[in-house]
Amino acid sequence: MDIGYVSALSALAGSAVGGLTSAATTWLSQRAQSRAGQISREMTRREDLYRDFITAASSTYGDALMSNEPHLADLVALYALTNRMRVLSAPRTIACADQVMMTIIDTYFSPNRSVRELRDLIKAGAGIDPLRQFSEAARDEVGNIFRLG
């Protein structure tokens, strides 16, 4: 075999390896960027859902503390948010959301609280925060999505 052919084949092989390496690097970079975008969208989607649930549940719970007449539209909105979570969320988060719902409904059937009674309960640490476990479960879930990505 002529030495000229060896040089030519070496150059062609080097070009082929360089081209494949460049293509593989580009493909891997695009894949990583795509995955990062998916994770970002998923986190935003869940954060928005959890924010909406916390806002609606807080408002409804406040109403339940002061009134015995539930606003059906508010409860239906909470059930809708909870059912949206069933599609996206981990079982622990859903269980906590269900517990919040039951607490709110039970609160409508308990005696109304005055502002003074609420202040005393808060000072005593009697736990009038039904969203605490839900918030912690949601935070853990969103953190896990970030860590797994």
Image (cartoon, rainbow, N blue to C red):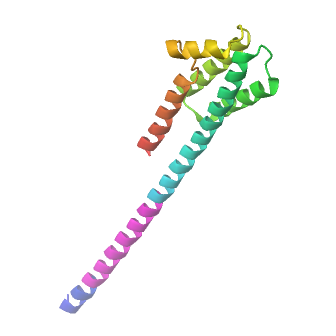
Q: Confirm whether residue 125 shows in the render.
A: no
Tell me the magenta residue range. 10-31
Residue 37 in picture, x, y percent from top left: 52, 54
Q: In the image, what residue occupies the spot 51% across and 57% down? A: 34
Residue 132 in picture, x, y percent from top left: 53, 24
Q: Confirm whether residue 75 shows in the render.
A: yes
Residue 84 belongs to magenta span: no
Assign the magenta stretch its main secondary structure: helix
35 on left or right of 8: right
Q: Quadrant of residue 87?
A: top right
Q: Quadrant of residue 110?
A: top right
Q: In the image, what residue occupies the spot 62% across and 12% down? A: 117
143 on left or right of 17: right
Q: In the image, what residue occupies the spot 57% across and 22% down? A: 96
Query: From the viewer's perspective, is residue 72 above or below residue 139?
Result: above
Q: In the image, what residue occupies the spot 52% across and 23% down? A: 133
Query: From the viewer's perspective, is residue 74 above or below residue 38?
Result: above
Residue 32 in picture, x, y percent from top left: 44, 57
Residue at the far front in the pictured view: 116
16 on left or right of 88: left
Residue 21 belongs to magenta span: yes
Between residues 86 and 60, which one lies in front from this camera angle?
60
